[in-house]
Amino acid sequence: MPIRPAASGPTLPLALRSRLGRAAPLALALGPLGALPAHAQTPPPTRSEVLRVPEVAPVEIPETRAAPCNVAPVASPASAEGAPLEHVALEGVTAIDPAVLASEWAPLLGRPIDHPTMFNLAERIACRYREAGYAFATAQARTEDGAWTVRVNEGRVAQVVVEGGDEKAQAFVRKAFGSLAPGRPLRQADLRRGMTIARGYGFWNIRPMARPNAADPDAVDLVLTIVPPKAAVFVSAQNASSDTVGAWSAGANLIVNGLTPLNEKTVLGVFSGVGSDRQRGAQISSDALLTEGGLGVRGDLAWFEQKPHERPPNQDTVGVTKLARGELNHPLATLPDGLVTGRVGFEAVNQDTELLNGEATLRDRSRVAYAGVRVEGQAGEVSGSAGLTVRKGLEAFGASRAGDALLSRPEADPQATSVRFDAAATRPLGRGQVAVQAKGQWADAPLTAFEEFTWGGLEGGRGLDPGALYGDRGVAASVELTGAPHDLGGRWTVSPMAFVEAAQAWNEDKAYGAREQSAVTGGAGLRFSWNDRIHLDAIYAHPLAETRGVADELSGPRLHLGISAGYEINW
């Protein structure tokens, strides 16, 4: 399976997952952006700009999507020999109301029929089962003494068989699909539920299939094959950065899996401005599974440099951000429809900015401990996740203190406490989907720039520059519709999309008073895809309401363009 653009970010569409580049402002005692001077300083880099490697790499499994029935309703043949159809007996039907299936042959009653017509009827009934979400249902028609019977095999599961991987990996996958009850017809929702839980354990490449059970011809064995993931390369470019650091940026990720028995995934990412060195960075991230109980570990190292060409009278600067993070995670509970995971971690961030003459203007040292929970699950056709994290600034390990002269915000408290939440859900809509997102943050004191709630750019707020809207506290939400892909020929398809998104943020600065920012944007776009490997995106965004508290040059209508491609590597 080719690497999808989803591998560049969380379980969202590519436009929402892009990571954009920005530059840090002077840390002058001007309050929040100097109360928006004539030309606003380039906002400081946020978490999404520094951490461009995805936390997870979602893989869509086509077998887990119920597809519309493409078998036409059965009609009486123009000429047929034989007795008129009086009745059709059903065998093996338990999951669908027989009266619903009877409507499929109602137009044939009293008319002469032939064998091909009845065989088509059987296929139409099997198709209706699959349309209702029964993944492996089949049907056969037979006649005896002029009476017709359609026998349905609903795909009842006799047993779950796990193949591939080692014993530890197989145990995790069995646990993920443990809610499948023998004797019950298998649905796509059951597969997706199991895939969601397996993903929580770090297993993404699971291939489901059904084979007849040796002892019971009316049942199937669900075979789950753990496919060793291949190395892959993902590259992308987009024109979504601030003008001060160059609109176009590009990046590449190398994804390597399974180098040790710990089921680890390591991603090395690099990025740079296109045609300039005004933004560039690198990151290495790795996830591994430590114990059979599901204890996992994640580590991140990131470096980011920005050299914005500021709008006069602001002075040009050079800024560097360095980040190190370690995290432990563990499943807390397995729900009927999902998985609850807990995590604890420590993060250290150094941000420095200086004038071109070497004079320091910003020096933040954040040392943060955090703990949180995340729920991932499946309810019917809706897949979703939600997370809550509490973050506490520490005084140890060389952390900045409140009142330090070169803090990114004069009133920032590096030891503040903040609470973050996020939620996302997707649901199939025909052959397309609808996606809903929300995120927010609360803090008990003014925060340093890197810890603030931010919004803007393709990560959310596509009518604004990256990070143009920010605050100690904030909320944001979006709704995005993606249409069915339309075939253009030559392996090319095009999919339409439309979105609406909104955010509001608050800064609690005593010296300057509370300041509120808000924005609502909307737009539409097209995605052109070749063989599901190369993707071209064109998205137009426009403010839908008055944008408050954001400098004019940081908001307004804009056309976002992007290209991405992914390839697997055999080595």
Image: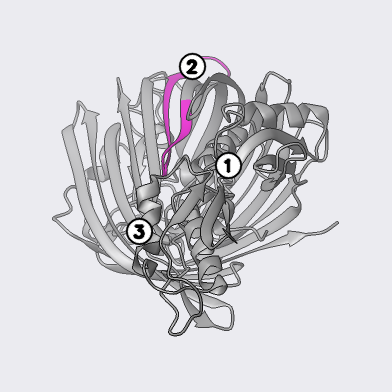
- Rendered residue at 66%/22% (across/down): 294
Mark 1 lies on residue = 56
Using the numbered discs, state the Cα–Cα distance from disc 1 to disc 2 in whole angstroms: 28 Å
- Rendered residue at 43%/84% (across/down): 78
Q: Secondary structure at mark 1?
A: loop
- Rendered residue at 38%/36% (across/down): 423
x%, y% of residue 34? 25, 44
Residue mark closest to the camera, 1 vs 2: 1
325 displayed left or right of 315: right
Callout 3 amino acid: Ser
Q: Earlier in the sequence, mark 3 or mark 2?
A: 3
Q: Does the magenta segment cover residue 35? A: no
- Rendered residue at 73%/26% (across/down): 171
Quarter of the image for the N terminus: give it.
bottom right
Callout 1 amino acid: Val
x%, y% of residue 129? 48, 52
Look at the numbered discs 1 and 3 and tell me whether their residues touch, using CB distance below 8 Å: no
Quarter of the image for the C terminus: give it.
bottom right
In the picture as drawn, the residue positioned furthest to the front comes out as 145
Viewer-side residue, 524 vs 107? 107
Q: Which residues are magenta?
A: 374-397
Q: Is residue 76 above or below residue 252?
A: below
Mark number displayed over residue 167: none
426 displayed left or right of 257: left
Confirm whether residue 223 shows in the render.
yes
In the picture as drawn, the residue positioned furthest to the left comes out as 546
Mark 2 lies on residue = 394
276 displayed left or right of 83: right
Mark 3 lies on residue = 103
x%, y% of residue 158? 67, 34
Q: Secondary structure at mark 2?
A: loop
